[in-house]
Amino acid sequence: MSYQSDIEIAQAKSLVHIREIAAKLNVAEDNLEMYGKYKAKLPLDLIDEEKIAKNNLVLVTALTPTPAGEGKTTVSIGLTEGLNKIGKQATVVLREPSLGPVFGIKGGAAGGGHSQVVPMEDINLHFTGDFNAVEKANNLLSALIDNNLQSKVNNLNIDPRTILWKRVIDMNDRALRDITIGLGGTANGIPRQDGFNITPASEVMAILCMATSFDNLKERLGNIFIGFTFDKKPVFARDLNAENAMAILLKDAIKPNLVQTLEENPAIIHGGPFANIAQGTNTVLATKMGLSLSDYVVTEAGFGADLGAEKFLNIKSAFAGLNPKCVVLVATIRALRHHGGAAKEEYNTASVERVKEGFKNLEKHIENIRKFNIEPVVAINSFISDSEEEVQFIKDACADLGVHAVLSEGWAKGGEGTKELAAAVADVVENKATQFKPLYDWSSPVKEKIETIAREVYGAEGVIYDKKAQLNLRRIDRLGFNDFAICMAKTQKSFSDDDKLIGRPTGFKVTVREIEIAAGAQFIIPILGKMMRMPGLPGKPASEGMTIDNNGVISGLS
C-alpha cells in the first residue's frame, strides 16, 4: 500500500453538505450562516446552560512535546470518531490553526491521517476570516493610539514611553519583534518604539476566547490596558472609545464555526491562542456550544499539560464553570525516548531503557492532572517505529499508577483505531468522574498564584523575580488587578523555563523576567526565561515544500 499524505487523504474524501452535519446536532438549516457548502457559523442563541451542566467534557492534553508535537489534535478527532463508533453522541471542539506554524515548523492543526477535520485546506488557511478579524481589531486599536498621540483634538496626554499595546500579524516574522515607528517627519506620527506579536498572542484573541456574550466582548475590549498618561493615570481602550469599533470587526468572528470530520461527525473550531504565550484553548462559547448540542465534547489544549491543560483548568474552566470529567494525556514513544536522552536522529530507534527514563515526564503529568481531582487516561499515539516492548512498558507502568493506558491508532484507522480509547474514556466519565477543582483561587495574591503553578505543576523549588518583574508587580497592585488569573508564558519544551532541562527536572527555580497585563482578558502574564511572543521561522520552513497547481489543488500542506 502506497503512503498517502494528510492532504491527499483529506482531498480524497467526498464531503457532505454542512446542513447534514448540523442535522446530527439537531440544528436547523435556517440557523446556519453558511460559508459555502462545507463551513458554517453557529448563532450564540443555541447555547443552553442546562444542557451544558448535564453533558460530558473531555480534555485532551499531552506530555512535554518534541518540536513536531505529539498529535493532540489527531487524537482529539480520532477519539471523537471512536466515541461515535461505540454509540456515544460526540463532537470535537478545537482551536483554529495559525498561519505562522502552518508555514513554519509544525504545519497545520487539522489533525492527520484518517483523523482529520475537513475541508483541511480552508481550515488551515483563511477559514472563515476569524484570525483576520482579530488582527484588524487589534491593529485598529494601535492606529487609534498613535492617532491620539498626533491629534490636537481629544488628546489623552498618553506618554508614548509607557504604551504596552503592540501590533499583530499572523505570521512568524522575527524582524517585527522590535521596531521603530513614526519616522519620516511630523505628518507621519510620533516616533516611538513598538513591535509585533503573532496574532494568537493578541489580547484580542484572548478576549474572544474568554467572552461569554457580545456585550461581554465589548466590555472586555474596553478594559484593555494601554499605558499611562504623563501624569501617571492609566489609559484603557474605552478612553479612546475603541470598543464598539473593535467589536464591529468581530461581529462574525464571535460565532463558532461548524465543519466535519472525515467520518462525517460534527466539529466546532473557534479561536486560536497559543498555549506557551497565551491560554491555548478554544473559546468558552465554542465549548459551551458543543456541550449544548452533544452528549460528549472532546476538546484539546495546546502543548504539554503544564501549559495548555493548566490554563484550561485554572483559567477557562474556573471562570466558565466547566467541569471536565476526564483528561486524556497523549504520549508518543518518540517523546518518551527524547525525554530519556535520545538525540533527534534517534527518536525512531527503539529503546526500552530510554522510554523507562522518559516515563518520568509522563508520570509528573499524571500526578498534575490528579491534583485537579480529575482522572487521566493515557493515549499512546501510535507510530510505525514503536516496538511492542516499549508500548507494553508504558501500559504496565501506567497500570502500576492506577491509570489506563491505551494504544491510539486514529491516524492509521480513524474511529476503528480509537474504539478502545473511547471505551476507556467513557468508563472514566460514567463511572469514575469527580468534581474538578482548580489549583488556586483567583482572589489570592499574584505571587502566591504564580508560585503555586511553579511548585505544584512545574515542580520548581521556587520563583525568582527579575527587577522588571518586581516593578510590574507593584504596577499590578497599583492598578488593582490582583484578582486576575495567571497565564504563564513559558517554553513548551520543559517543565522548567530552560528548554534544555528535559524529562522531569528537579532542584530548579524559574525566573519571571517581566509581567504583562491583559486586563480585558483578566490575565496576568508572567514571562518566564527567554520566552518571546513573536516566533521566527525555522531554517527550512514548511512553506518551501508546498505547491499549488492551475486547478487550485494544494500539495505539501499538513
Image (cartoon, rainbow, N blue to C red):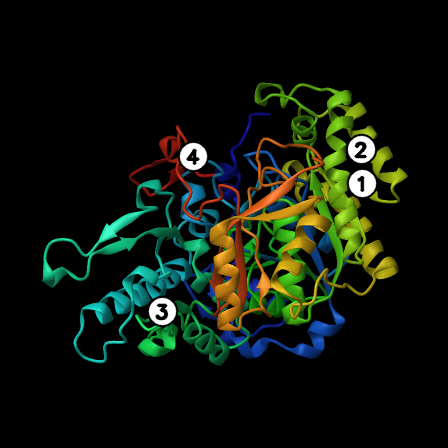
| Residue at the spot of label 3 | 228
Q: Which residue corresponds to the image point at 62% horizontal and 19% vertical from the top-left?
A: 346
Secondary-structure class at tag 4: loop
| Residue at the spot of label 2 | 394
C-beta proximity under 8 Å, tags 1 and 2: yes
| Occupied quadrant, residue 458 | top right
Q: Is residue 391 above or below residue 411?
A: above
Q: Is residue 417 above or below residue 241?
A: above
The residue carrying pointer 4 sits among few (fewer than 14), some (14 to 19) or many (20 or more) residues within 10 Å by Cα, namely some
* Disc nearest the viewer among 4 and 3: 3
| Residue at the spot of label 4 | 556
The residue carrying pointer 3 sits among few (fewer than 14), some (14 to 19) or many (20 or more) residues within 10 Å by Cα, namely many
Mark 1 vs 2, N-terminal side: 2
**Residue 16 vs residue 355: left or right?**
left
* Disc nearest the viewer among 3 and 2: 3
Counting from the top left corner in percent of width and height, residue 57 is at: 71, 62
Q: CA distance from mark 2 to mark 4?
A: 33 Å
Secondary-structure class at tag 3: strand
| Residue at the spot of label 1 | 405
How many marks the image carries: the answer is 4
Looking at the rendered structure, the kind of residue marked 3 is Phe
Mark 1 vs 3, N-terminal side: 3
Closest to the observer: 440 or 257? Answer: 440
Mark 4 vs 1, N-terminal side: 1
| Occupied quadrant, residue 172 | top left
Looking at the rendered structure, the kind of residue marked 1 is Ala
The residue carrying pointer 1 sits among few (fewer than 14), some (14 to 19) or many (20 or more) residues within 10 Å by Cα, namely many
C-beta proximity under 8 Å, tags 2 and 4: no
